[in-house]
């Protein structure tokens, strides 16, 4: 937000940040369980949770973009928030990519 010089986060930005934090925490836990045979079932549950969070992130992102284009007459602000939302959504997508890789590795070596 400093880069784009926005003063305070929107409600949707806060929602996306909450999802980012949850998804990153799940990735961290999943990575720590990859070597543990007992933890593999838990790892798969974490991958499912990351996928759920990614779907939730997509939904919030779509809502944020719709609201942004519906309510904005400030075009500079619109562009700034569009970029911020896209970056946050991209982080959530990368978490899902990591979860897919971890799931594949876990199943391959089960």
Image (spheres, rainbow, N blue to C red):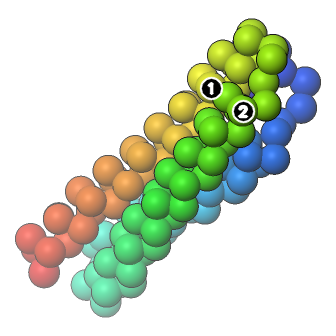
- Report the side of 77 relative to 29 (left or right): right
Q: Locate residue 36: give its quadrant.
A: bottom left
Relative horizontal placement of residue 106, taking residue 77 as reference (left or right) = left
Q: Which mark is residue 19?
A: none
Name the residue carrying label 1.
82
Label 1 sits on a secondary structure element that is helix
Disc 2 marks which residue? 70
Farthest residue toward the top?
76
Q: Nearer the viewer, mark 2 or mark 1?
A: 2
Report the quarter where the N terminus lies.
top right
**Residue depicted at x 71% and y 20%:** 78
Picture coordinates of residue 84 (x, y %)? Answer: 64, 28
Residue name at image x 73 percent, y 12 percent: 75
Label 2 vs label 1: CA separation? Answer: 13 Å
The vertical placement of 35 against 79, above or below, is below
Residue 16 image offset from top left, x and y in percent: 66, 49
Of label 2 and label 1, which has the lower sequence position?
2
Camera-side residue of 74 and 110: 74
Could you say which is closer to the camera, residue 72 or residue 108? 72
Q: Residue 37: x percent and y percent?
A: 25, 84
**Crowding at label 2, few (<14), some or many (≥20) Cα neighbours within 10 Å?**
few
The answer to which quarter of the image holds residue 31 is: bottom left
For residue 40, above or below residue 89? below
Which residue is outermost to the front? 70
Instruction: State whether residue 8 is above or below residue 80.
Output: below
């Amino acid at each position: 937000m400093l880069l784009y010089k926005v003063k305070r986060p929107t409600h949707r930005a806060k929602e996306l940040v909450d999802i980012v934090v949850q998804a990153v925490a799940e990735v961290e836990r999943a990575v720590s369980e990859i070597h543990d045979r007992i933890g593999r079932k838990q790892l798969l549950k974490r991958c499912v949770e990351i996928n759920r969070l990614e779907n939730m992130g997509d939904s919030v992102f779509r809502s944020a973009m719709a609201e942004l284009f519906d309510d904005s007459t400030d075009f500079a602000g619109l562009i700034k928030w569009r970029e911020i939302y896209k970056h946050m959504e991209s982080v959530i997508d990368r978490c899902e990519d990591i979860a897919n890789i971890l799931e594949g590795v876990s199943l391959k070596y089960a």
